[in-house]
Amino acid sequence: MTTVGFIGLGIMGGPMAANLVKAGFDVVGYNRSPEKTAKLVAQGGRAAASVAEAVRGADVVITMLPDSPDVQAVALGEDGILANAREGLLYLDMSTIRPDTARAVAEAGRARGVRVLDAPVSGGEQGAIEGSLSIMVGGEAADFEAARPVLAAMGSTIVHVGPAGAGQTVKAANQLIVAGTLELIAEALVFLEAHGVDTEAAVKVLAGGLAGSRILERKATGMIARRFQPGFRVELHHKDLGIVTAAAREAGVAIPLGAVVAQLMGALKAQGYGDLDHSALLKLVEQLSGRNAG
Ligand code: NAD
């Protein structure tokens, strides 16, 4: 039986770890706030009291943490993953972090005989619960093949996109598309409401045409109802747009719309909405339009 150490049992990591249990893996979970580990135990997993405990005895280790500094600390820290890894360990970081950090972690892993893949995901909380995530993987092809059975328990579209860091670069592009699309949906909804149009009916017909998208299908109803519980937190998308703008600048690529959306997401966070779902971009459009401000 393959033992998987799973670190970071939040909105995404919790259901992903539960799906690994369902698929028959021996899952040892660790989270900074322990009540989330208790939930995994109730679902058939085991609890670890530290990163070291989750890593010792594991064949595969997965992290699903908020940001680059969290992954750096947990992977490279004094009593972290690499310090406790056995030779040949397969380590998959599934968080969304900076591509250069992913490359640095992969290099540090290689120096210690640990096989590292960056494997960020798309599909949201719903995809994590359903086990239908899209997983974009950077790293060695042989390591990708070794990780495939584990990834298949969490996702349905699993693609090796290139060397270390490439998964994170693809994820950055994903976040650019999602943020831009959400902003346009927010603008369209406020626009339709201002004209007194039945937005439910409008979304139904829009979803069937060229403007249709999974984002429209999954998010518009909640936005119309002003339901903004996350989902995907504004704070995390703000972090991701920082990654996108930095990586675009590094490559000398202009992303004018992306830059505007990054500013809007930052403004939403600055107004105290960091813990709302990213579809709360609609609140900002309302404020800018002098409608239901606040
Ligand atoms: P979250 O904040 O719900 O979960 C993160 C978890 O990590 C929390 O439970 C937190 O307690 C734990 N944690 C933080 N630091 C830790 C540490 N040092 N040791 C152990 N545990 C620690 O976030 P999330 O929404 O699950 O997102 C996780 C990652 O996945 C982020 O990088 C995010 O950008 C990405 N992501 C999220 C979504 C989504 O829809 N929520 C979709 C795709 C990708």
Image: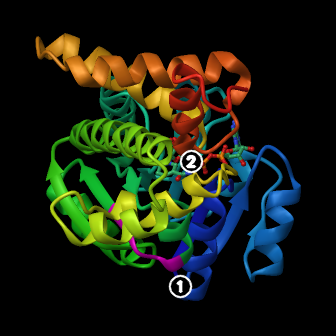
Indicate the quadrant where residue 235 lies. top right
Q: Residue at x 42, y 53 (%)?
A: 92
Can residue 206 be seen at all in this image of the molecule? yes
* Up-down relation of residue 255 to residue 132 (above or below): above
Instruction: Name the mark on residue 232.
Output: 2
User: Of residues 2 and 196, which is closer to you in this image?
Assistant: 196
* Up-down relation of residue 222 to residue 172 (above or below): below
> For the residue with label 2, is its CB less than 8 Å from the closest atom of ligand 1?
yes
Left or right, residue 167 beside residue 112: left
The answer for how far apart the CA atoms under marks 2 and 1 are is: 33 Å
Q: Which residues are magenta?
A: 130-134
> For the residue with label 1, is its CB less than 8 Å from the closest atom of ligand 1?
no
- Image x and y of residue 217, in percent: 40, 67
Instruction: Name the mark on residue 30.
Output: none
Q: Residue at x 67, y 54 (%)?
A: 227
Q: Which of pointers 2 and 1 indicates the residue nearer the eye?
A: 2
Instruction: Name the mark on residue 1.
Output: 1
Please identify the residue farthest to the front as the structure is shown.
Answer: 196
Can residue 83 be seen at all in this image of the molecule? no
- Image x and y of residue 248, in percent: 21, 19
- Which three-letter amino acid code belongs to the residue tagged 1? Met
- Image x and y of residue 254, in percent: 14, 15
* Up-down relation of residue 263 to residue 230 (above or below): above
